[in-house]
Amino acid sequence: MVFGFCLALFGLTQSFTSPTKVYWIRELNQSTAFGPFINRHHFAGYMELTIALPLGLLFAGAVDKEKRLIYLFVAGLMGVGLVMTASRGGIISLVAEILFLGAVTAIWRKHSDKKLTRTGRLKRLAARAGMATALLIGLFLGVVLLGGEFSLNRFIDSVNTDDPTTGRAHFWSVTLNIIKAHPYLGTGLGAFGVIYTQYDTRNGLYRLEQAHNDYLQVLSDAGIVGAVLALSFVVLLFYKALARAKSRDDFRRGVALAALSGCFGVLVHSFFDFTLHTTSNALLFLVLAALATLNGRVEDAPRKRRRRSSSTTSTEPSAISPDTEPSAVAPGK
């Protein structure tokens, strides 16, 4: 959370002072930089992962009252940084992430909430919906107050253009043709940039390295076999994470939900971009997957110490185990 906060602050500073250069030095001609990322969509993808931790803990009620304002401020700055990228996929994923947290925490019952009446559950559902709505409104107001109207205008203009997909519709249609030609095992991992030119119906002036849809690219690169493996990973991730969310420990439950929401946000973003192809994003995604599915050691009962029977315990003091209680030691001769 600390790193995400600092990265959002750095990205916003760079965006306001030098929006077309990376680290205020290198000018980019074919992409829009944001923070240390040469692709603003990948910065948005990273913020989706880092913002999940404070938001998830807040929605799960795992933060002390005196700390909630700090967590909200940290999450707010990350959210503003994400919206300022004007990444449509990133903004859609952020909204989906917040709605996911609101829905899961409203439906999911703690052990202490089993006695809640129907009215109490409806009130909690309304509270979560109000929190999600207020958070989204606050994020966009924060962008406007910081002078980020140009980002919102760019976002709206890109939707209203003749091709709101920014070429993705063509990329996806070509990818579908590749999948039809190699349905079972695909064309090979990492081969998309080479095989794409064979099926591209345009002049081929620009070489496309990714399909801008990770699900289609998995089918293209690894076929049905790879898609089944990828789907199995996602199913296991949600199954294990939701099992950890049943923990009696509020903080453990909050961490599981927070980490899972970050993974969910990136999985939504993967429908439009390829943020997980960036090493930093993929690494943080796996870290959150580990946090979401880590075993519930906090729930385990302490193991009982085994006591040696008097028949096997030595009468010499040096042979006494440090874990053996004095009452279990046979009296010396």
Image: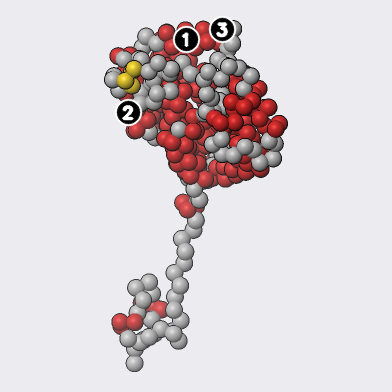
Place of residue 123 in the rendered image (x, y in percent of width and height, measured from the top left)? 57, 26
Disc 3 versus disc 2: distance between alpha carbons? 34 Å
User: How are the residues colored?
Assistant: secondary structure
Disc 1 versus disc 3: distance between alpha carbons? 11 Å
Q: Quadrant of the N terminus?
A: top left
Place of residue 80 in the rendered image (x, y in percent of width and height, measured from the top left)? 41, 19
Q: Which residue is mark 2?
A: 6
Which numbered dot is residue 161? 3
Q: Quadrant of the C terminus?
A: bottom left
Q: What secondary structure is found at the residue carrying circle 2?
A: helix
Instruction: Give the left or right position of residue 6, taking residue 206 as reference.
Output: left
Which numbered dot is residue 154? 1
**Amino acid identity at mark 2:** Cys
**Residue 52 seen in the figure:** no
**Amino acid identity at mark 1:** Arg
Which numbered dot is residue 264? none
In which quadrant of the rendered view does residue 8 lie?
top left
Disc 2 versus disc 1: distance between alpha carbons? 25 Å
Q: For label 2, count other residues whose C-alpha is less than 10 Å away and answer few (under 14), some (14-19) or many (20+).
A: some
Foreground pick, 246 / 136: 136
Q: For label 1, count other residues whose C-alpha is less than 10 Å away and answer few (under 14), some (14-19) or many (20+).
A: some
